[in-house]
Amino acid sequence: MNSIYDPAFWSRLQFAFTITYHYLFPQLTMGLAWFLVYFKWRALRTGDEKYNQAARFWAKIFGLNFAIGVVTGIPMEFQFGTNWSEFSKYAGGVIGQTLAMEGMFAFFLESAFVGALIFGERRLGPRLHFLAAVAVATGSWLSAYFILVTNAFMQHPIGYQIESNGLLGISSLSAYLSNPWAVIQFLHNQMAALVTGSFVVTAVGAFYVLRGLHQTQARLYLRAGTLTALIASFLVAFPTGDQQAKIVGRYRPVTLAAMEGKFTGGSMADVAVIGQPNVAARRLENPIEIPGALSFLAYGTFQSYVHGLDEYPEDTWPDNIELLYYSFHLMITLGTLFIVLMALATLQSWRGRLEKSGWLLWVLMLAFPFPYIANTLGWMTAELGRQPWLIYGLFHTHDGYSKVVSSGDTIFTLIGFVGLYFVLGLLFLYLVGREIWRGPDEEKVAFVKATGLNQSEVSPA
Amino acid sequence: MIATWYSIVSFMLIVYVVLDGRNFGAGMLHRLVARTPEERREVVAAIGPLWTWHEVWLVGFGGTLLAVFPRLMSSAFAGYYLALFLILWGLILRGVSLEVGGHINDHLWHRFWDSVFVFANFLLAILFGAAAGNLARGVPLDAQGNFSMAFFTDFRAQGYVGLLDWYTVSIAIFAAVILAAHGATYLTLKTEGLVHDRSLKWARYLWVAVAPLFVVISIETWIVRPDLPGHAIYNPFCWLGLIMIAVSVIALITGLNSFREKRAFIGSNLLLVGLLITGSGAIFPVMLYSTLAPGNSLTAYAVASSPQALALAFIWWPIGFVLATVYFLLISRRYVGKVTINQDGY
């Protein structure tokens, strides 16, 4: 296992790389979509042109982001067949349901309206344009739900039966779709996407204030961004993150033990604030711990017993405990810092001093990559924590890869993706950077130039 | 139930080919029918803001295939490993060049992305054509229903075949020509002026070329799979397909000659649908034919999910389909008629 001659290792790496890269884009799409809805709604209600300007500016960035999300998303579904064909054969009857529903219910909705949202302001008129924003936002969140149901089935399978041919079949579509794991994971993940979206909006606002440009727009972004970021950062931690950890503790104590680096069980279990798991020696190095916190957080009382890894056979442990531990802990650290930072920003904004707090604006401007990191770490926790299973308790990861595809073929396609995605990344950063550099006001001028219309003719009366 | 699902899955793939096929066609002809930057923007505008909606039919097809015929997806996707990644990369390049090509107003930038766009569309038309040829000819399935295929072997259409041989290459060429004709017909409907006139000229040339090629590939198919015409005779869908082909030929000829672009475009769509229905009807119930031993072939009955999974999917699929159609109609009626540039990005 995990050797370069093992095709499963390369298929895992390729899926991990392509999904991690892909998910950089949808998380902003899902976060930003509701900002567009908000701006369009305010424009419709107040008739204030600044909201339309904001919507137009962010729609440009949304469009670029959405496009890269679409093109990097299609390989994900195909890879179930190309690289994980044994898994597809085994579980397709179940997970195929939600992958197909995602296409039928979410992608058709999103893709029908996204072009109209980005380019159709004049063609659609203000009311339908607002509805297009709602449709795109709804579509993107629906798509997340279907994907998270699929993932939740792999984390905590319910609603299935094993058919006479040994393959999985679905026994209850409603149980499958309302998997409690999926509901919690969905809420946690969507709040995290809102964190990314609001940090990006805030960062652009801070950038304009610091440059002394587009002041009206900058104030709008900063106000809407910091408040949303504070609420979303809080909701990521509590109740959604808290519930997510509790459900892991309830159904998969071995995963929780690995996430926390608990090699031995006990009551009054500590949470390590700092520490490095040493799997070979079965201990946590240089731990700084909060006594009893883990017992309380996972099971509600300080006396609760928390299982340790030593209670489980080693072949049921996640196969990369160190990485799992670091991912989980760094995610929590970042999440906590987000709450602190945005509480400060909201306080300063409420006191009317945010635009004069130069140091805070610098931090807000530079903070936007960290929600991307935290989202990625969260998904690494979920997926590394699921190991060594592809479907927890039912199907081993090592049984799922395509037997007819050699590791060389997969290395080749992996390198292809790395190269192509590197270029896509450069392209995306350059084009988005260019839009941000040009800013919202010139956007308006370009719009007038392109349409030959004054803003008053297209804005709601 | 299994036959119904076979029809639904074929339907989704056919809708995809017809809708995105016109984009591939318009894309392949992009540099030929449009010479100036403005004209090229017109072609891109004709492809329109719904190209992602078109592409969703492919995604929906993939998901549905996994849900209802998981063993087929498992065997075919792994077997076509490298070819599928070429398709994926082609789709990425096509999408990116369409989205970013207009972002910067610079002639080198335009020229670069235009070329990427043309290249990606050619690649996709050829690869989808070769894939169709592979479905008709079959693949070297072993007794377990698995295969792994080289790009090409000895170019013969029997035994250990590769992705490309004389038969699949000719289907690929046919696909590129017919999709280019389809795209050119679409452009006559959506554009005006010089682009329209050049598109009309290309549409006429290309449809004239389709006719002899069609005869050639029909004979070739009969040589490679002599059993197929026998199947087709007993399948009402094949008859439906043949009727559609006959009607579409009349619509195309009269439409193109009398400048009734809408009629020609309907004919063009109908022709593709007719061809694909005939093809998918003729191979049924086999979904993947084995060139090694006919007994190894994967039939729809052997690769289907449990009856329960099929029944459950049959509840939500029609709802999703109706909704998807409603969204499409809601938006597409705002984009009817000739495109005019300089009003929206599209």
Image: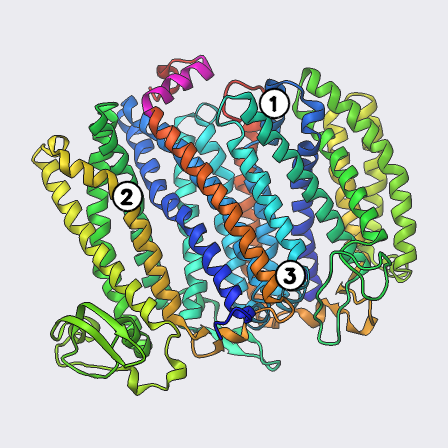
**Can residue A339 be seen?**
yes
Assign a secondary structure to mark 1.
Answer: helix
Assign a secondary structure to mark 2.
Answer: loop
Amino acid tagged 1: Glu
* Left or right: A454 as drawn, with respect to B194: left
Report which residue position mark 1 lands on. B42
Report which residue position mark 3 lands on. B77
Residue shown at 24% from the left, 50% from the top: A232
Report which residue position mark 2 lands on. A368
Instruction: Pick the residue in front: B78 or A144.
Output: B78
Q: Can you tell which quarter of the image residue A255 is in? A: bottom left
Q: Which region of the structure is painted magenta?
A: A439-452
The numbered mark at residue B181 is none
The disc numbered 2 marks a residue on which chain? Answer: A
Instruction: Pick the residue in front: A2 or A303.
Output: A2
Mark in the foreground, 3 or 2: 2
